[in-house]
Image (spheres, helix red, strand yellow):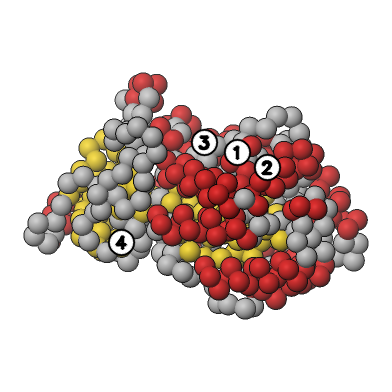
Amino acid sequence: MPSLPPAPARHALRGRAVTFGTNPFLDDPARALVHEPDALILIEDGHITRFGAFDALRDTLPPDTPVTTWHHGIISAGFVDTHVHYPQLPMIAAYGEQLLEWLERYTFPTEARFADPDYAAGVARRFLRELLRAGTTSAAVYCTVHPQSVDAFFTESARLNTRMVAGKVLMDRNAPANLRDTPQGGYDDSLALIERWHQHGRQLYAVTPRFAATSTEEQLDLAGSLLRQREGLFMQTHLSENLAEVEWISHLFPRRASYLDVYAHAGLVGPRSVLGHGVHVDEDIFHTCHAAGCALAHCPTSNLFLGSGAFRLFDALDPRRPVRVGLGTDVGAGTSLSQLQTLNEAYKVAQSTGRRLHPAQAFWLATAGGARALYLDDRIGTIAPGMEADLCVLDPHATPLMAQRAEQCETIEDLLFVLMMLGDDRSVRATYVAGQLVHDRDAPEAAGERDPGHITSFT
């Protein structure tokens, strides 16, 4: 990723743009999708200040405003990943297991290496670069049990100025000794990290019990206490991913009515709580999630890879009691950090359950829906005045096959469907973070690693 000079405080982008005015699961998808064939987006000090048709806004531009024109791209809000494990990047595509065996054989040995701060820093740097290459500008990220893994992640995120949610994993049982903390030690480490990083620039902290099986009731109760220490904290964990896991939880917590009740009893279920997977849940749990305002992270590539099952997306989003839902890549059980590839699998999962995922609905999940799941939809996820200028430029002609297929497209929905079925990181032409160009696919690469921070668009 080459280094480019900083963008001016005020600049503009021009090109075809898509965003959302309403929720396409609750409204007609064609009406919910906002498509501007020739848009102008004015960016000032990292925020969008004007958005609309170029012809209507061109004469309102302040003098000498540089304009970058993306002739063949589609400008979108940056993608939002609501569930991903950055320490598992080194073990992506590990063969042959289902969830619990996969954790023992691959995940825990990999995460043990994050006791080394230099190793953690190297993986954090690679992970964030790969996210930006995929057009993802915000994510809810699991670190490891080691506080230094959190420091490494937030240090790199702060350098890039990405809006990220992350936290130290809490895990005091049913894990190797070198990956366990204690209830009080996990509390103390988390509180120190909260003080250091929560709302530091664009960084946000998530209290992060890995899942109910790896925390005692004492640790879960202290996690609930942590959430009450500061305004705006997040909580992330796993829920009902795998049938063997669900059965295990019922034995570990026999007094609780359900897997979700384990977390609710500890005060962990509410706004800004993000529950990964939710594959094996019933209607009562959907109702509880709706009433509590918590979110489910749909992780189709992971659920297919580990054979966990099919998330019931349309049941979760039932208009009678819609649950907040975002997309998660869940690397390393997930097979790609690309939200385009994640949408590919989400479409197939929906088809297998007898439903059709409209491309407008799909891109809403990857942008505005993910932002809403994280309670950040007042800042990210759409293109509108006042929003933070986290954007990606998509290329529906990125490969010869895509170019051939795109030539047959008659509507913007057709083009978006091509992107979600045939696209990957090659289809992301550029990525902007707070108005700065941080990834340019076609910029010439220099030898060796280059600093990806503090870079901007060409004018």
Apparent side of residue 45 relative to residue 417 in the rendered image (left or right): left
Q: Which residue is mark 2?
A: 110
Apparent side of residue 28 relative to residue 186 in the rendered image (left or right): left
Q: Secondary structure at mark 4?
A: loop
Disc on the earlier residue, 3 or 1: 1
Q: Which residue is mark 1?
A: 90
Q: Dot 3: few (<14), some (14–19), or many (≥20) neighbours within 10 Å?
A: many
How many angstroms separate mark 2 from mark 4 (CA)? Answer: 37 Å
Q: Is residue 93 above or below residue 314?
A: above
Q: Nearer the viewer, mark 3 or mark 1?
A: 1
Can residue 350 be seen from the camera position used here? no
Q: Which residue is mark 4?
A: 46
**Residue at left 57%, top 46%?**
119
Disc 1 residue type (three-letter): Pro
Point out residue 389 in the picture as x, y percentages from the top left corner: 33, 57
Q: Are marks 2 and 1 in contact (CB under 8 Å)?
A: yes
Apparent side of residue 184 relative to residue 133 in the rendered image (left or right): right
How many angstroms separate mark 4 from mark 3 (CA)? Answer: 28 Å
Report the disc number at residue 341: 3
**Residue at left 29%, top 33%?**
444
Q: Nearer the viewer, residue 228 or 363?
A: 228
Report the disc number at residue 322: none
Q: Dot 1: few (<14), some (14–19), or many (≥20) neighbours within 10 Å?
A: some
Q: Are marks 4 and 3 in contact (CB under 8 Å)?
A: no
